[in-house]
Image (cartoon, rainbow, N blue to C red):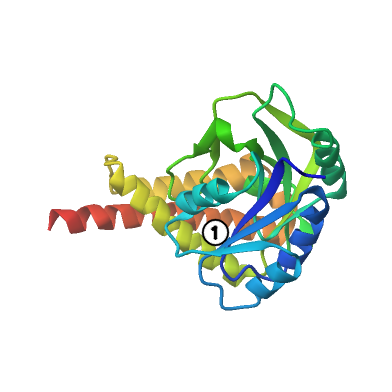
Amino acid sequence: MGACLSVVYITKNAGQHFGRSLASVAHITDELLVVDSGSQDNTLMVARSAGARIIERSWPGFAAQRQFAVAAAENPWVLMMDADEILTETAAKTIRNTFLIGEPAGVAGYLLERRSFFHGKEICYGDWSHDRVLRLFDRRCGAYGENLVHEAWETHGTVKPIPGCALHHYSYANYGELLDKMRLYATLNAQQVHQRGKVLRGYMPMTHALAAFWRGYFWRLGFLDGVEGAAIAWTTALGAFMKYAIALELRDCDRQ
């Protein structure tokens, strides 16, 4: 099974869900590939115990690392997984049946529905509400875009959805991790805004922050997720504020 499908990860200190993630995909493929950028925890040990092929490579950025991993895979079709994502049994069965007799015809990729969990509860509203991600694709029909953050596979072929929830996402263990990742993304997003030469105004940090909070907490009903929903909305708003504040800072440094 899985003669034309590789499951691929990029990792660094993958965390507590990595073993479960590997176990959820091991039976749908003949290749587990892990591209690691200097893990100092038990990531490589967990990967080896699952039978994964490991490539150790310094970190060039999200999109570049994913593109390298895709190119290093042995099979034409790739399922790109994050170490904090678990493939559901229903999705695994669907994928297994899809590839049972060879490559799917007339399609270049599949969208997987992803549901996020925080503090052990499913987040049903706000900016983390159910989203679809293009993670199962024919690597011959596309490439990763050049965004510094939230990179996505871009294909020129037909894309179809896999029905039902496909991924359970356990991205943060606590509020500290949520804030740490917000800071990283804000910095990367600010660098991207700066590189693109976008015209910036002093009011932008505040207006973007207010818009982000209103969208996530009220428009997308984030308040229905309780304290977690409020934390996600406030953190997203802070990330929007810092994105434009840092971009303004970078602009001013260039002018000096």
Q: Quadrant of the N terminus?
A: top right
- Which structural element holds mark 1? helix
Q: At 61% across and 78% down in the image, what residue appears?
A: 41
Up-down relation of residue 235 to residue 151 (above or below): below
User: Is 230 or 155 nearer to us in this picture?
Assistant: 155
Up-down relation of residue 141 to residue 52 (above or below): above
- Considering every residue shown, the one lying at the far top of the view is 106
- Considering every residue shown, the one lying at the far left of the view is 256
Q: Is residue 183 left or right of residue 156?
A: left
Q: Is residue 81 visible?
A: no
Q: Few, some or many C-alpha atoms within 10 Å of disc 1 (few <14, some 14-19, many ≥20)?
A: many
Q: Position of residue 58 (x, y in %)?
A: 45, 65
- Place residue 246 in its image quadrant: bottom left
Q: Position of residue 201 (x, y in %)?
A: 28, 44
Q: At 72% across and 40% down in the image, what residue appears?
A: 4
To which residue does mark 1 refer?
235
Q: At 48% across and 64% down in the image, what residue appears?
A: 57
- Place residue 53 in its image quadrant: bottom right
Q: Quadrant of the C terminus?
A: bottom left
User: Is 62 or 240 nearer to us in this picture?
Assistant: 62
Q: At 66% across and 70% down in the image, what residue appears?
A: 15
Q: Is residue 44 left or right of residue 103?
A: left
Q: Position of residue 7 (x, y in %)?
A: 69, 50
Q: Is residue 220 left or right of residue 61?
A: right
- Place residue 253 in its image quadrant: bottom left
Please state which amino acid type lies under the numbered disc 1. Thr
Q: Is residue 155 visible?
A: yes
User: Is 21 or 28 nearer to us in this picture?
Assistant: 28
